[in-house]
Image: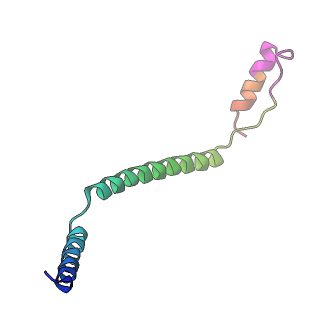
Amino acid sequence: MSETQNSTSQKAMDEDNKAASQTMPNTQDKDCEDKLTQVALALVEDVISYSVKIVEEEQNPLKNIKWMTHGEFTVEKGRKQIDEYFSVS
């Protein structure tokens, strides 16, 4: 086989291989894509969950109460602060 024929044959084989690789999905690429999709879905679920939590906290904000120290604590003062914490403003 001459050099020109060999070169032409190689080009034809390369073209065939390229066409086949484009039509047949690579299983490694598919596995990688599936794993990437799973990670992306998990990330989106976490972001949505966190966003919902933030919105709920904005609708029902926690009160910032200055709690007494253990030295100041009495049963009566403790009950009063707990009532204050749970009371609706």
Whether 25 is drawn above or below 65: the answer is below
Residue name at image x 72 percent, y 31 percent: 85
Whether 47 is drawn above or below 8: the answer is above
Q: In the rendered image, which quarter contains the C terminus?
A: top right
Measured as percent of width and height from the top left, residue 44 is found at 47, 53
User: How is the protein colored in the picture?
Assistant: rainbow
Residue name at image x 79 percent, y 16 percent: 76
Q: 34 left or right of 18?
A: right
Q: Which residues fall within the magenta stretch?
A: 67-79
- Label the magenta part by its dominant secondary structure: loop
Residue name at image x 20 percent, y 86 percent: 4
Measured as percent of width and height from the top left, residue 81 is found at 77, 25
Residue name at image x 72 percent, y 26 percent: 83
Q: 57 left or right of 38?
A: right
Compare residues 84 and 50 and report the one nearer the observer.
50
Measured as percent of width and height from the top left, residue 10 is found at 21, 77
Quarter residue 88 falls in: top right
Q: 30 left or right of 38?
A: left
Quarter residue 6 falls in: bottom left
Compare residues 87 and 46 and report the one nearer the observer.
46
Q: In the rendered image, which quarter contains the N terminus?
A: bottom left
The verdict on residue 76 being magenta is yes
Compare residues 36 and 21 and report the one nearer the observer.
21
Residue located farthest toward the right when viewing the structure as drawn: 72
Quarter residue 62 falls in: top right
